Amino acid sequence: MFHPLRVSAVEQLTDDAVAVTFAVEPELRETFRHTPGQHIALRRTVDGEEIRRTYSICAPAAEGAELRVGIRLVDGGEFSTYALKELAVGDTVDVMEPTGRFVLAPRAGQFAAIVGGSGITPVLSIAATLLACEPQSGFTLIRSDRTVASTMFLDEVADLKDRWPDRFQLVTALSREEQQSGLPSGRLDQDRLTGLLPALLPVADIDGWFLCGPFGLVQGAERALRGLGVDRSRIHQEIFHVDDGTAPAATAQAPAPAHSTLTATLDGRSGNWPVREGDSLLETVLRARADAPYACKGGVCGTCRAFLVSGEVRMDRNYALEPEETEEGYVLACQSHPLTPEVELDFDR
Ligand code: FES
């Protein structure tokens, strides 16, 4: 559900990125309490057309914490262009409550993250909260950016280093610029990470890995970790955008039934509707229920997650659900198409 929130600060982070802070009234504090790593969907209507985008919360999660997100300009991106060029203090934006399972609730242990570009945003919240709340923890951040000037949250990350010099390790790789300290320039790909990680930290002793950024980086990092013997259950990932061409093709298409009906439960109310040819299950629900949850419609954010109660579906793509979630029976409604004449989804589970 969306809530209109007032913008209380807009800070320029780099030439092409801002941090936006929203004022949260006391009666909504509980609604907007987040677990480090979660994101919020923002909504804007232009010429009668609704645009939704998800942005990760960069602020630490703590009592009275701010609701602050990082927004980087995407070429031709309608929301990010608006955020960078027009959004100002005092404006009101519709904001959905925090969601997402790329999270770390503070606990004792050693954790590490490999991030690229704006992938730093949720990891900043994860690391800052962990270090502040759990004295028996350590965090290694390996970040990859094009240049220093394009690096988001430089000051905030430097602050972590100053405050927790023994428990926070920072390694920076710049792909397009030489640097005085840190790694030689160049992209962090699977081969490079395979050689680098064992030299930086005891890979087998890391309790959780957080990979976040563009598809290519996250995929390369995951392969490197798997190759180094890290168990899947310790690897968490969030993909910020998928460049066409690097994404795997959709799974082989099984034949769809000529007619199928979707039954869906949302906010305790159920309904059933025929699924039009080519429509996803999300589109089917949205025809009757404008409150159906979604943001990216691209299989990336996970906002449309629903439990498949009965029937079978095929998903075009899935960059949001962990393997355990799909095994439990969760699907992304925006990517799902029926494979059986009857399909039932529950958005409340
Ligand atoms: S709306 Fe983002 S994954 Fe479905």
Image (cartoon, grey):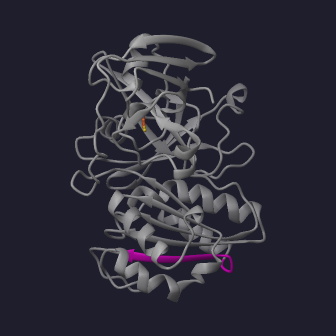
Residue lying farthest right?
135
The x, y position of residue 346, in whole percent, is 57, 25
- Taking the magenta stretch, the answer to whether it contains residue 340 is no
| Residue 203, above or below 22 | below
Q: Main secondary structure of the magenta part?
A: strand
Question: Does residue 44 appear to the left or right of 20 in the view shown?
Answer: left
Q: Quadrant of residue 124?
A: bottom right
Which residue lies at the image location 67% right of the left edge and 71% below the top edge?
A: 163
Question: Does residue 298 appear to the left or right of 245 in the view shown?
Answer: right
Q: Which residues are magenta?
A: 165-173
The x, y position of residue 210, in whole percent, is 54, 62
Tag count? 0
| Residue 300, above or below 168 | above
Q: Quadrant of residue 203?
A: bottom right
| Between 147 and 307, the one nearer to me in the picture | 307
Which residue lies at the image location 61% right of the left edge and 18% below the top edge?
A: 267
The quadrant in which the N terminus is found is top right
| Between 322 and 48, the one nearer to me in the picture | 322
| Residue 186, above or below 83 | below
Say if residue 189 shows up in the picture: yes
Which residue lies at the image location 65% right of the left edge and 56% below the top edge?
A: 104
| Residue 86, above or below 275 | below
The x, y position of residue 81, in whole percent, is 30, 39
| Between 67 and 311, the one nearer to me in the picture | 311
| Between 142 and 81, the one nearer to me in the picture | 142
The quadrant in which the C terminus is found is top right
Which residue lies at the image location 55% right of the left edge and 73% below the top edge?
A: 230
Say if residue 87 shows up in the picture: no
- Taking the magenta stretch, the answer to whether it contains residue 166 is yes
Q: Quadrant of ligand 1?
A: top left
Q: Quadrant of residue 277?
A: top left
The x, y position of residue 69, in whole percent, is 50, 45
